[in-house]
Image: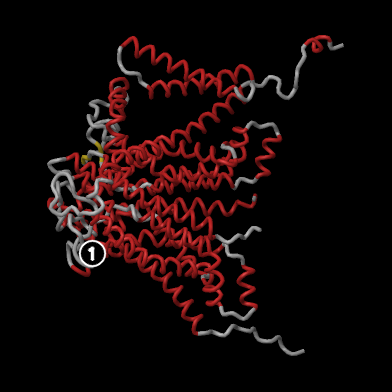
Amino acid sequence: MTSATATRTVANTYTAGKLPKWTPWVILAVSLLITLGASALMAVSSGDGMNWILAIIAGVLLFVLANWLLALLVEGGRQAKNRLVTSLVTGAFVLALIPLIWLTLTVLTNGFPTLTNGTFLSQSMRNVVGAGGGALHAIVGTLIITGFAALMSIPVGLMTAIYLVEYGRGKIARAITFFVDVMTGIPSIVAGLATYALFALLFGEGVRSGFAGSVALSILMIPVVVRSSEEIIRLVPNELREASYALGVPKWRTIVKVVLPTSIAGITTGVMLSISRVIGETAPLLIVAGFTASMNYNPFSERMMSLPVFVYTQYVSPGTDAQAYIDRAWAGALTLILIVALLNAVARIVSHFFSPKLAR
Amino acid sequence: MTAAPARITAKKRLGDRLFSGGALTAGGIILVVLAGVAIFLVAQSLPAFLVDPSEIKGEPDSFWAYVGPLVFGTVWAAALALLIAVPIALGISLFISHYAPRRLAQGLGYTIDLLAAVPSVVYGLWGAGVLAPAIQPFYAWLVANLGWFPLFTPPVSGTGRTILTVAIVLAVMILPIITALCREVFLQTPKLHEEAALALGATRWEMIKMAVLPFGRPGIISAVMLGLGRALGETMAVAMVLSPALIISFIITGSQNPTTIPANIALNYPEAHGIDVNVLIATGLILFVITFAVNSVARWAVSRRKEFSGAN
C-alpha cells in the first residue's frame, strides 16, 4: 500500500530534516576563511596592510546570514529564527568581552613600564616637572580616605542591617529600607557636592580636606554595606536563633554570638566589595578633597591626593612633557585596578573558605 | 476557670536596650544623612535660583537657559547609552541563563561582573586615549556616507571625542548592572513554564519568548531604570572623553557636543568661586531630582512584580 514511502529509507525519524550538530562550527570556519582570504587578496592587490578587524566582522556577519539561510532551507522558518537568535545572543556576550579584554591589555601595556620604574611607588609629585615622580602621595591618600570612610560606614551599615533584620518592624523599618534604596541611587558627584555644602557651612567657603572625602565616600558606601549585610543576615536559619533563645540567651548575645559568627564570611565579602566600589570614586574626591602634588598624612587639614584624582589630573593637565604625564596616568590606573582586583580576590577567597556549609 | 495568664514578656536587659538602641540609632543616622544631603543641597543652591543671570559664568539669559543644554545633554547621552546597552545586556543575560553550558555559566557571569569592578576614571582614560582615536575613522566613514541622516550631519569630529563615544563608554559601564539583574530574574523563571513550552514543541527562542521574557518583564524594566540612573550620574568618563560645548544638538559625530550635568560640575568646580559654586550645586540638585525620579520608577516596577509572582 505504501510503496512510495518504502523506497525512502529514513535512518532515524527524530533527526530527519535536521542539520547535524556540528554545522554551525563548519559554517563559521568556512565564512571566516572566505572573508579572511578575500581580505588577504585585496591586501596583496592594493599593497596596503590587511584589515583583520573588518575581515573578522564581515566573516561573523556572513556566518550569521549563512547559518540562518541554511536552517531556513533545511529545517524551516521557526528553527531558522531560533538559530538566528542563538547567534545573536552568543554574539552579544562576545561583544561584551571585547572592551574588557581591550581595556585590560591597554592598561597593562601602558601602565606596567612606569609602575615598575622605581620612583612611581616611592615618591610623590612634589616639585616634579616632566618625567619621574610618583604616586606615593596618592596611594597613601587613597588608603587614608577610604580607611576613614570604611571606619564610618561599616559600623553604621552593619548595625542598620541588624536593625532591619532583627528588630525592625513597621513604619521606621520601611522608611529606612526606602531611604537606603534612595541613597543607593545618589550620583557620586551629588554626594560630593552635599558634603562640600556641609563642610562649607561648618568651616567656611573653599574648604578641602581628606576627611570630607571620607564623609562623601561613606554616603556612597553605607547603602551598599546595608544591602549586602542585610541579605546575608537574612540567610541565617531561624532555628539557630530559636535554639539560642531556648537556652535562655538574651537577644543581643544571640546576635553577637550566633547570628554574626554564622554570617561573618558573607558580611566580610560584602564589605570588601563595597570598599572596592568606593575606592575608585573620583568625582566626590575631586570636589571635597581637592588635589595636590605633596604628601599629606593629616586627613583633617589641607588638600589630600587620591589615586583616582591622580589619574584624572595627570591626564587633563599635562605639563611640558605630556607623554610623562599620560604614562603616569596609565600607571595610576593600573595600580587602582590592581588594588580593586586584590580586594575582589580576597572577598572571593573569604566567601569560599569561611562561609558556613548550610546545605549538607 | 481562671483568666488566661498574662503574656510573658522578656526581661529588658541593659545589653538588650543598648544593642537595639544602637541598631536604631544607626538606622536613624541614615535618615539624618539623607535629609542632610537634601537640605544642604537646597540651601546652597537657593542663591543660584535668585541671582541675576548676568553674574553667572558665560552670562546666559537666565539660570534655566544655562541648565537647559546640560539637562538635555545628560538625558541624551544616557538615552544613547541605554539604546546600545539594553539589547546587548539582554543578550548576555539570556546567554548566561539559558544558552551557556551549565558548568560555565557562573564563571561567565563573574567575567561580566569584572566590567563593574573597573573604576570609572579608568574607563575615562581608556575612552579618551584609546577608544576615541580608534573609532574616529569609523565616524569619518559614517559622516561621508550617511551625512544626509540628521544624526550624522557633517562636519565630523577630528578627535572622535563625541557624544557617541561617550555613549559607548557609558554603555560598557552600565552593561554589568543591567546584566546582573536580568540574569537573576531570568533564572527565577518557573521551570514548569519553561518545560511546558518545550513540551509543546517550542524551539528555545519560542520558549524564551513565551515563558522567560513575559515573566521577567518588570525585572527587565527595573534593571534598565537602574542602569539609566547610573548613566545619568556618571561623571568622570564623560568629563574625560567629551569635548564639551553648551549647546543643544542631536548630532552624535560632530565636534560640538552637549555636555552633561555631572561632567560640567567636575570640569568647572575646581576653578569656580562665589556664585558659580552655587550654580553648580544647583545643577547637582537638578541631577539628584532626575535620578531620584528614575530610581523611584525602577522601585515601583519591582514592587509591582511582588504582587503577581504567585506563579513561583
Residue A49 x/y as whole percent: 32, 18
Q: Quadrant of residue A140?
A: bottom left
Taking B23 as reference, is B41 above or below it?
above
Q: Looking at the image, which residue sits at the far right?
A: A1
Q: Position of A300 compared to A340: left or right?
A: left
Taking A54 as reference, is B307 above or below it?
below
Taking B99 as reference, is B22 above or below it?
below
Q: Quadrant of residue A41?
A: top left
Residue at (42% x, 60% y) in the render: A223
Q: Determine which residue is flagged by label 1.
A: A297
Mark 1 element type = loop
Q: Chain of mark 1?
A: A
Residue B307 x/y as whole percent: 58, 54
Q: Looking at the image, which residue sits at the far front?
A: A118
The N terminus of chain A - image quarter: top right
Q: Nearer the viewer, residue A114 or A195?
A: A114
The C terminus of chain A - image quarter: bottom right
Residue at (46% x, 15% y) in the render: A34
Q: Nearer the viewer, residue A47 or B90?
A: A47
Q: Amino acid at mark 1?
A: Tyr
Q: Nearer the viewer, residue B272 or A301?
A: A301
Residue A117 x/y as whole percent: 24, 45
Question: Which color scheme did the rendering employ for the protein?
Answer: secondary structure
Mark 1, Cα crowd under 10 Å, few <14 / some 14-19 / many 20+, is: some
Q: Position of B231 compared to A245: left or right?
A: left
Q: Looking at the image, which residue sits at the far bottom?
A: B2
Residue at (62% x, 33% y) in the render: B204
Residue B68 seen anywhere in this rendered image of the structure:
no
